[in-house]
Amino acid sequence: MAISLRFESTLKSDRTQVWRWITDVRCLRREMRPWLWMSIPFGVRNLEDLDFQPGKPLFTSWLWLFGLLPLGVSKLTLLQLNPGIGFIEQSPMTGTRLWRHERSLETGANGGTRVIDQLTVEPLFAGWLVEGFLKLFFASRHRALRARDRKQLH
């Protein structure tokens, strides 16, 4: 059974700045802490620096719960990468039939940016546990984005 979740945050920073954050792998790792740590090939700094071909894996990443417990691998695969607008990731991942993450940016009130994450996941088992974890994980990711936004503006 598919799990469908949506998360939104409105930031005061403009779309250009937010786009830099969400494609910079260092920012991505900070956004994922403390829940997950993902390996990224040496030298990769930004998703836009990679040879993007829709539907072809960019790289294989190991995923670690709390940076300690191995969860499996993800073959990071983007279907779309639209600078300043968003991306659609649909990656083969351990423990799932389907992992689809759509992240979009919209211009919000007063020139700010709304970040929208839409997830569709079909776990192989323990759907209730996966759903609960994803709710915690993405709520934490959005808190990290809002904190970065506040820090940027001060």
Image (cartoon, rainbow, N blue to C red):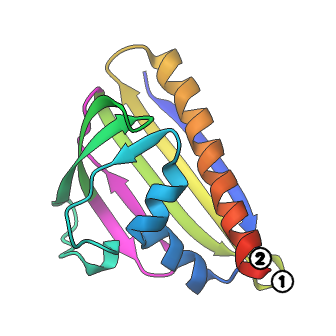
**Quadrant location of the N terminus?**
top left
**According to the image, label 1 marks what residue?**
110
Dot 1: element: helix
Q: Which residues are magenta?
A: 78-95
Residue 132: horizontal and vertical position, in percent? 58, 24
Q: Residue furthest right?
A: 110
Q: Is residue 64 above or below residue 56?
A: above
How many marks the image carries: the answer is 2
**According to the image, label 2 marks what residue?**
12
Sequence order check: which comes first, mark 2 or mark 1? 2
Residue 98 placement, left or right of 65: left
Q: Is residue 111 above or below residue 135?
A: below
Q: Is residue 77 above or below residue 139?
A: below
Residue 105: horizontal and vertical position, in percent? 59, 71
Q: Are marks 2 and 1 in contact (CB under 8 Å)?
A: yes
Amino acid on which disc 1 is placed: Asn
Amino acid on which disc 2 is placed: Lys
Q: Nearer the viewer, residue 143 or 124?
A: 143
**Quadrant location of the C terminus?**
bottom right
| Residue lying at 58% horizontally and 44% vertically, measured from the top left | 138
| Residue lying at 77% horizontally and 80% vertically, measured from the top left | 153
Residue 47: horizontal and vertical position, in percent? 33, 72
